[in-house]
Image: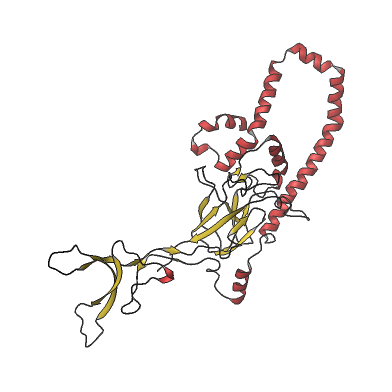
Amino acid sequence: MVIAYLIGHAHLPAWIRLPGSGEQFLVAHISHSVAAIMVATWIALFTPDGMVYHLRTWRPYRATVRGLKLFVLPLVFACSFIVLAVLFGSHLVFSFEEASGRVCSQSDNITNAIARGARVTDQGLGACVSPGIASCPKPGDPPKCSNGRDVFCGEGQPVCDSMRKPNCDDRRANCSYDMPVCRVANPPEPGKPPSTRIANVATCPFTCEIGPVGEKRKQLDIREVCHATGIWLEQGQKYTITVTPPDPKDSDHAWRDGDGTIVSTRGRLNSGFVTKVKEAIKWPLKRHLFVEPFKVIARVGSIGSDERVLEPDEDTRTNRLDVQIIPKRSGELFLYANDAVWGWPGKRNYFYEDNSGKATISVQRARQPN
């Protein structure tokens, strides 16, 4: 089935094809092995019978086969099972530690807010303000907007016009009020003084304070096993996460793994034979087995397993991530690049510490009322 899928997957309808990450894994890691097996099978089928008989009765060949069956292969299989048990055991141990909160540590600003009994919904992320009408704070002053926004007029200049409420009695109420408007000069007319007209109401544009707060938290370092953003996400709310890495063509700042190979948010750009062998050996240690190395993972909460892969868009000219997520639970946002980890006692970040490269993070949540 695997061979048939690899041969004809490009011609299959989308509804029966594997998801993008699964198909990339098959094509990148299994297609070459299947091709080698197919070549060996064809050679065996078309080898002359006489040559096969001569080979199988040749004494050195028989001694080699006997040694392989009785000594070499049993030893190799025994060692392989031990190695696989250690590697997959490490993966399971790390997964348990991560789910129990021993890998990603909650930021101090959130911990302190919880200890004080304060709200954590605003931690690390400023409020987004929807567009609205400007205000006239004092008579004679120009219109103003909250949150430091500039007053917007499609045409004309923003001014505060004094107006009267219709059918209002000055003896019973204050009938005058200031209205933020945009005034435009009328075309000049001979014999008449210059005049203006109201073009529209003066408005305040949409704005949003984007987190994280603090330069250190705004930088995702791919050497980090878990990057704490200090941003608290609410269950069921929509958030847009943007990760802007350097251009892979920028040799001074591009992401690189331990052996100097350039990588990106899409995974490895070029993988030679030696690199693929190393990947195959480290595969059981990867945090997400079927996700390409160095793809960015978003995690919500230091405890649990609410994680998702931040996939880049189809435009391969950029590696920028711009992904909207809806958390399944409330918690702090953590980010990290998918790589191998060591779960047994020892150096957990052994495979991470040789990586190099950073990316700028920004997080924006849904709008709030003006």
* Location of residue 359 by image quarter: bottom right
Q: How many marks?
A: 0
139 vs 34, left or right, is left
List the single residue furthest toward the left. 191
**Residue 354 horizontal/vertical position (percent):** 71, 50
Please tell me which residue lies in front, 83 or 357: 357
175 vs 130, left or right, is left
List the single residue furthest toward the bottom. 171
User: In the figure, 47 relative to 276: above or below?
Assistant: above
49 vs 199, left or right, is right
242 vs 65, left or right, is left
Which residue lies at the image location 67% right of the left edge and 36% below the top edge?
Answer: 272
**Residue 274 horizontal/vertical position (percent):** 71, 37
Q: Give the position of the N terminus as an image quadrant.
A: top right
Query: What colouring method underlies this structural image?
Result: secondary structure
Say if residue 291 shows up in the picture: no
List the single residue furthest toward the front. 191
User: In the figure, 65 relative to 312: above or below?
Assistant: above
**Residue 181 horizontal/vertical position (percent):** 28, 69
Please tell me which residue lies in front, 178 or 66: 178
Please tell me which residue lies in front, 274 or 341: 274
Say if residue 73 shows up in the picture: yes
Which residue lies at the image location 67% right of the left edge and 49% below the top edge?
Answer: 339
Q: Give the position of the C terminus as an image quadrant.
A: bottom left
